[in-house]
Structures are given as C-alpha cells and as structure tokens.
Amino acid sequence: MSVNASARALQSKGSLINKIKNYNPKFPVQRARHPEIRTMDQLYDCFYKYARQLIGAEANPNITLESRKMIESELKVVIPLATDFKARLNMTDSNGHIRMGRLLEAIDIVAPCACYMLNREDLSLKTFETGTMPRMFVTARFHQTSLSHGYGLSPYSDIVLRGKVTWTSDNKAEATVNVIQNKSEFLTAQLVFTSLDGTNTARKLPTNQLLPATPIEKFLNQQRHKANTSRPAIPELGAIQLPVVQNGQQAMSSTTVETTTIAQPEHENPYGSVFGGFLVRKGLETAELCAKMFAKTPLRVASIDDAEFLKVVEIGSILKFSSFICNVNNKEQKFQISSQVEVFNTETSTFELCDRFLFTFETEEEINLPQVVPHNMQEFVAQWKAKNIAKAN
C-alpha cells in the first residue's frame, strides 16, 4: 500500500470515529419519556432486583396461576442512541451500522422481562419486582429471525424494543420483541423460555397462561403454538456417504474457526450464571469471523435461523466458540454457518456442548463461492438442517 493510500485509509477511519463520537442531533433534546417506557439500564436494575430475591426465596408449591391478557405482559424499552454517546458507541460497528450481536443481546433481556410482566403479582405496577416467587425464566430457544432490515437502523435515533408474551404452555412462555425506530418496525424476534424454580433449577414451575383477547391475538397465539409444538423430521442417517472433494468444493471442516475465552463476571446474568445474550453475541461474532475468512468479500448477517440453549453455564467457565460453513447458495448469494458453544469440564478434561446456533450470511457482491462437503455426522446433520430451513423460506 502506498503512503498516500495509507493516509487516505487512516483519514477515512478517523472520519468515521469522529462521526460517531461527535454527532450532534439536529432535533431538540428528548422530552421526558412516557412512564411505560424505560431505558435498558432501568430494566436491568429491575431485573437484578427481582433475580437477587430468588436466592432467599422460599419454595411455594401452591402458587396460584391466572390467565392474563397479552397486553398485561407488554413493556417498552428504549436504547437512547440519540442522546447517549456511550450507548451509540457500544451499538455501532466499524461501518457505522448497528451491531446485530449487541441488538440480539438487548432483545434477550427484554424478552424474559415480558414473561415476568405476565407473572407479576400486582398488575397495577409497571415493574415486576413483586413477581410470583420463586419462578425464574431461562432462554430455551431463539426462533428464526430476519436481520437484514436491521442494517437500516440509524445509530443516531433511539431504538425502542417492545416485548410481549405471545404463547404459553404449562411451564414455558414465548416472548415476541419488535425493534422499532422512528415509528417504523425493522425486525421481530421470538424467544422461548422455560420456567424454573429459582431455588432448585432442576425443577420446572408452572407459569401464568395467556388469554388471547382479540381475533388478531387468537390468530397470533395459534401461529405461535404451531411453531413451538411442531417437530421437524429427522434425516435418514443411513443415507450418509463420504463424498470426495472435487474442484469447486471444499471440505466443511477446513472452514472451521474457533475462539476460546473465560466467562467473566461482566457476562453474568441476574441469576448469577452466564447471560444467554452474551453467548448469542459471541456465537454470531465467531460466525462472522468464519464468514469473512471464507467469502473474502463484503457481507452481512441476514438472519439467525435457530438457537438452542442446552445447559446453564457458570461464571469462570472456559468456553470454546466454533463455527463452520455448512451450506452455500451462490444463486441467492447466501451461505449458512453452524456455530456452537462448548464448556470445558474440568473433571473429564473435555469440552461439552451447551449451545448451538445457525446463521445465514449474504454477500454484497456477486461471487461464486466453493460448495462445502460434509465428512462426519455433525456436519451432515448441520447441512441437512440448513438446507431444510432455506427451503422453508
């Protein structure tokens, strides 16, 4: 690179950083917010206050359950990008776009809080510190979520996250979170949570049930019931063959990228274990590393197709994040990445699976990427799953 080119690159980076740091909104300072809208910090303080009470809570086998309306679970939370420089810097990537991993983290805070809103003792309150104890909600699944429109979000306007419960079963609840900016909806995410006894997490607890009140709510509830109770077909394991890698192909294992880290106290959720949103974000960031090294071209994450949380992870654990390309579709300029999280078991000196994710990336330029070839059962199933999700959409 020439001296002039280097200077231009540095100048461009400096300009981007200055835009983020020194941006002055061209509209008046924001007025006092509606009392039903709170900031992420306020919501997290409320979350912590409730969760810390679980430690000393007494088990109550006779919890009175109620059927409640969808609106009684609703809450609205703002990420104040228009006025908070630190929030803006935290949520923005090097290209000036909203960081999708950070946004998924925020969604994974709002969603369980909507479940607590449905289970709060006093419906006249707008917070849930007095929720029916000792219930706690832990993330079980992150449904497929399109993220493409999220790149249209501005880092200079407030983002509002609107969460509400859209489906319940005996001991599970699903929350839907809408991401809104300037009164326009950019994306919608659905997360499923399991209701556990806060004093004995091996035991599931019943949760308040949802009572759809309008035709639209009834239709939405039926849709979500189908999405949460239907099971995909299992691939024929006998059909697997070990193909030979040919020209224009690449062994799936050769695309693997791994990162290892330690779960620190800053990654702690209000229950004292590792925050699920952190695991999703790191899983996505590892997948993004894998995507960039594979495609070597400008790209962006198009969707999170699936996310399963299999076990609770403790602070101080050694975590290994690994990602590999599992399916390529050059016609649509998309490819899918299987990403998983493993926790190190000190007793057996082995890594054990605790979470797995599936992401779709799309390239911004037309490019002919090599097809990837599976050579073991994990890779075969990952490719089968990715192709079936792609067909369904």
Image (cartoon, helix red, strand yellow):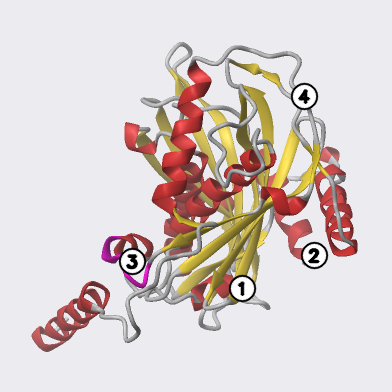
Q: Which amino acid does label 4 sit on?
A: Thr
Q: Mark 3 points at which residue?
A: 88
Left-right relation of 19 to 90: left
The numbered disc on residue 64 is 4
Q: Which amino acid does label 3 sit on?
A: Arg
Q: Point out residue 368 in the picture as x, y percentages from the top left corner.
A: 57, 77
Q: Name the residue under label 2.
A: 391
Residue at left offset 83%, top offset 59%: 217
Label 4 crowd (10 A; few <14 / some 14-19 / many >=20): few
Q: Which of marks 3 and 2 is nearer the N terminus?
A: 3
Q: Earlier in the sequence, mark 3 or mark 1?
A: 3
Q: Mark 1 points at which residue?
A: 185
User: Which segment did they paint magenta?
Assistant: 81-86
Foreground label between 4 and 2: 4
Q: Point out residue 285 in the picture as x, y percentages from the top left corner.
A: 44, 54
226 and 221: which is toward the camera: 221
Which quadrant, please, contains the C terminus?
Answer: bottom right
* Mark 3 vs 2: CB contact within 8 A: no
Which quadrant, please, contains the N terminus?
Answer: bottom left
